[in-house]
Amino acid sequence: MKSAFSKNRPLALAVTALIGLPVVLSGCGTSAATSTESVSEISVMDYYNNEPDKTFIGDALNACGTKAGVTVKRETVPGKSLISKVLQQSSSKTLPDVLMLDNPDLQQIAATGALAPLAEFNISTADFAPGVLSAGTYKDKVYGLAPTVNTIALFYNKNLLAKAGVTPPATWDELEAAAAKLTSGDQYGLAFNANPTYEGTWQFLPVMWSNGGNEKNIDTEETAQALQLWTDLVKDGSVSSSALNWTQADVKDQFLAGKAAMMVNGPWQIPSLDKQASLQYGVVKIPVREAGQTVVAPLGGEVWTVPQTGNKARQAKAAEVVSCLNSDENQLAMAKVRNTIPSKTTLAAKFAEENPKLATFTELVKTARARTGQLGEEWPAQATKIYTAIQTALTGKASPSEALKQAQGQ
Amino acid sequence: MSLTTDVSQATPPSRKAGNRLAGSTRTGATIPAPRRRNRQRRERLFQWLFLVPAVIYMALFFGYPVVKNVVMSFQDYTTATFFTGEAPWVGLANYVTVLSSSLFSTSLLNTALFTVGSILGQFVIGLALAIFFQRKFPLNGILRSLLLLPWLLPLIVSSAVWRWILDKDSGALNRFLGDLNIVDTGVPWLTSTSLALIAVVGVNIWIGIPFNLTILYGGLQEIPDELYEAGSLDGATGWKAFRHITWPMLRPVVSVVLVLGVVYTLKVLDIILGLTNGGPANSTQTIATQSYALSFQEFKFGEGAALGNILVIISLVFAVLYLRASRRAVDE
């Protein structure tokens, strides 16, 4: 008996290993943790995988870690794969101690129960702009805080506008007139992005919201007027129909190359715009239909959260780091280097004085709205409807109001 | 062959153990018949053991995902499921939602047009090139390996480059056509609802040519030269030679190329995502891209899985057709 087994040992081993493999693999996922251990290291995951943001955020994290008495083990993943990584980690119970999320994703992840409410750790949310707080809130509890935020506005090429004798537009009529006047030869008056992704929706939101449109029901007169504006601009040739396939980076490239005199874009493009010394540009709010309407822009930016890892001691340390990232000094420092706006309103006012280039964005953030503020987890489905309607109208397959009606009914 | 020799080599030392085992239940079991039966049983056991690694591998990496996908399509599988593990059973609701969506017919039609267009283009050009490269001329090998290039490039890179080439305002293709005075305004290759699908099919043809060329070229090499020599004596040259010698001899390779091509093309995702993202206005939306959008953009994993399964079934139909066709060929 014994001899027979020992003869076949390699085979037996192989079989055992193969059967055992999945068990071992799944075993890796569950790291048993006791809550009384002293914490010397915490893990962090974010999507700032490109320079210079990677270093800026890394330095801030390290400084906050040192302050909390822990070392920070950081993992940066590409933006597109963050959510799938988070989902995978939440099923294998290996979520990091500190997790960064893009703000429209927060409610989706908070709804799964994977995040801890920040109130548990006494993190102050005082003075944060209302839009920022609503982006980090799910069912009346704050789960994430963004140290700095951003939004979009209208960039214009000062030289091209001066040459055509055009002043920066403030209303839709002015925008259409200016864009038409600035269009000649290879040059388009305006560039925006209307591609079939959430980015296309995001760029449309300022005109839709400022005109009183609402994401809950897009089949309204207000939203139809906004979509009519986008459609007219493309139809009369002031905006290239390539907008249907451009990303925001493409839009910036068109503007940089002088092929678009104005563009809808955000402050994260400022570093690349500044690199081209010959380009003189200004920033104004995105025009409204009638003078006097308030511009409501969508809020962008990333929130920092504390996932439910089941280890209270580590969560407490993680919360200290999140709180530190959102401190006044860090908000100001990050805003300055990353061309973003501090989330606290008192800081923002001070910041705008010191950084006139970002003054328009600072002003916009005050009234900016979070995309998930009203719909929460329902936002992705509705955002899909919005970009579908934009594409249908811009390709001329249906009139703006008909396109919105179709999309809402889907 | 090697299996049986292995087993017979392994048998002599362990036969003792078998004897001892048998001896405990049966007294004086030294007669040849049970021993042979014993040996057969051991042989069977070993045969199974040799199969085990492959079976486990298949079950783990093919069986599990397929079963999981089918199960998922009957569940309300959301982001929350990943954390809580709860996915309520919803029966056929996901299939009903997906099939009754107004987008389904568009996607199905686009998938059909995309597949037929791509396969037709890839196959015809691939076959023409394969026949061309059969001739002996200088640099033949180098040219043929250069034609493999589209196959070697990552699809994301190819689609990014093509997206630039096909750009309406500053794309290379429009510049070229403009310089030849064929068009005077930029052709919106990727942003017109009537052209986008054609453009995407064109790019996919470009990507598929190397595959068709390689396999068909291999098939052509297999056809004995004597047939052509004999044919030419009977006056079968040029087109006649192709019609009566090349085509019939190539038929088995052709069916492999076509069926694999259909299955590969049905599931094409990255090229479309890279070029148009399903736009403009869903004019390049296929079942594959829609399934991707449902699962990974809207996080409706159940509906995404249901649509994915529908695509798998369509692929299966072609696989079965192929198997039947090849079986009939063998029967004949």
Image: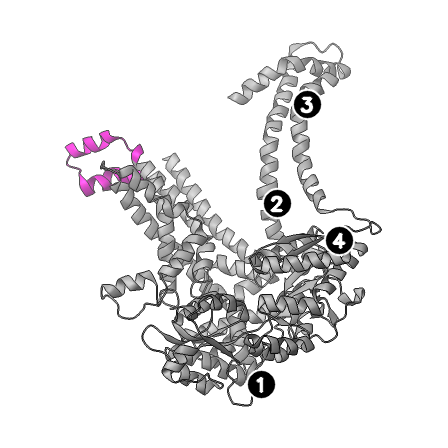
Question: For the stretch drawn in magenta, what is the main secondary structure?
Answer: helix
Residue A294 numbered mark, or none: 1
Quarter holding residue A374? bottom right
* Gap in angstroms between the C-alphas marked 4 and 2: 41 Å
State which tag comes first along the sequence, 3 or 4.
3
Mark nearer the viewer, 3 or 1: 1
Bounds of the magenta span?
B221-250
Q: What's under tag 1, amino acid-wise?
A: Thr
At x 35%, y 56%, the residue is: B202
Q: Amino acid at mark 4?
A: Val
Q: Disc 2 is attached to a residue of which chain? A: B
Residue furthest out toward the right: A36
Q: Which residue is mark 2?
A: B64
Q: Which residue is mark 3?
A: A9
Give amino acid for label 2: Tyr
Q: Give the residue number, with chain letter if any, for mark 4.
A: A70
Task: Looking at the picture, tell me which residue is in the foreground, B151 or B108.
Answer: B151
